[in-house]
Image (cartoon, helix red, strand yellow):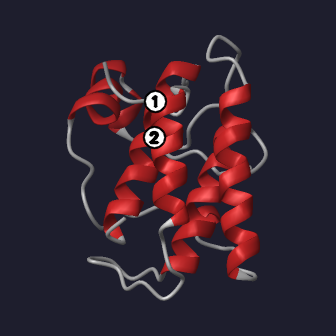
């Protein structure tokens, strides 16, 4: 079974990695700095929770087989274009952004995977289980980008 943000151990791992990220850590790839990445990941969780609207895109990833392959099996590619809404916000004070992301990780887990979840702009209709796996993998991808 794939790790999910709904799993307490997986969430604790992400929290520990976040706590070990210094604001001046250089990325191993990509253009974001650490504060921008923290804001990006926080905003992606807000999108999953329905708190941030992101315009839908027509992609082949909306097909269930492709969606499941990308979310559960295939490695996350580096440098994939992202929704402009998830790159728009300018980071505020580091500590506040880290606290905000930490709280969003916990808030995500308080919602039931069985609830109705908003669609993803690229993947379309998403169950809570898909969102949980994708949220974990997205956080893991970016934390790995910064060596934590």
At 74% from the left edge and 38% from the top edge, which residue is drawn? 107
Question: Where is residue 96 shown, x and y percent of the image?
Answer: 76, 72
* Residue contact at pointers 1 and 2, CB within 8 angstroms: yes
Task: Report crowding for label 1: few under 14, some 14 to 19, many 20 or more residues within 10 A (C-alpha).
Answer: many
Q: Is residue 25 visible?
A: yes
- Quadrant containing the N terminus in the rendered view: top left
The circle on residue 95 is: none
At 66% from the left edge and 30% from the top edge, which residue is drawn? 109
67 to the left or right of 125: left
The circle on residue 136 is: 2
Above or below — where is 138 with respect to 5? below
Q: Is residue 49 visible?
A: no
Above or below — where is 64 with respect to 47? above
At 62% from the left edge and 17% from the top edge, which residue is drawn? 113
Residue position for label 1: 4
Question: Where is residue 114 shown, x and y percent of the image?
Answer: 64, 10
5 to the left or right of 51: left
Distance CA(mark 1)–CA(mark 2): 5 Å
**Tag 1's secondary structure?**
loop
78 to the left or right of 53: left
Question: Where is residue 61 shown, x and y percent of the image?
Answer: 36, 35
User: To which quarter of the image does residue 60 belong?
Assistant: top left
- Quadrant containing the C terminus in the rendered view: bottom left
Question: Where is residue 132 shown, x and y percent of the image?
Answer: 52, 30
User: To which quarter of the image does residue 95 belong?
Assistant: bottom right
Q: Is 66 in front, or is 111?
A: 111
At 24% from the left edge and 56% from the top edge, which residue is drawn? 77
Above or below — where is 38 with respect to 55? below
**Marks 1 and 2, the one that precedes in the sequence:** 1
Task: Report crowding for label 2: few under 14, some 14 to 19, many 20 or more residues within 10 A (C-alpha).
Answer: many
**What residue occupies the far top of the structure in this picture?**
114
């Amino acid at each position: 079974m794939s790790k999910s943000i709904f799993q307490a151990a997986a969430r604790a791992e992400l929290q520990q990695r976040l706590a070990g990220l210094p604001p001046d850590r250089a990325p191993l790839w990509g253009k974001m700095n650490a504060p921008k990445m923290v804001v990006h990941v926080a905003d992606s969780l807000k999108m999953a929770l329905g708190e941030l609207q992101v315009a839908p895109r027509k992609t082949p990833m909306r097909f269930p087989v492709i969606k499941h392959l990308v979310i559960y099996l295939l490695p996350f590619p580096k440098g994939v274009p992202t929704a402009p809404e998830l790159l728009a916000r300018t980071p505020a004070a580091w500590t506040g952004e880290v606290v905000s992301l930490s709280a969003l990780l916990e808030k995500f887990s308080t919602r039931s995977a069985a609830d109705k979840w908003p669609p993803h702009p690229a993947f379309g209709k998403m169950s809570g289980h898909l969102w949980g796996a994708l949220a974990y993998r997205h956080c893991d991808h970016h934390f790995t980008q910064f060596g934590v």
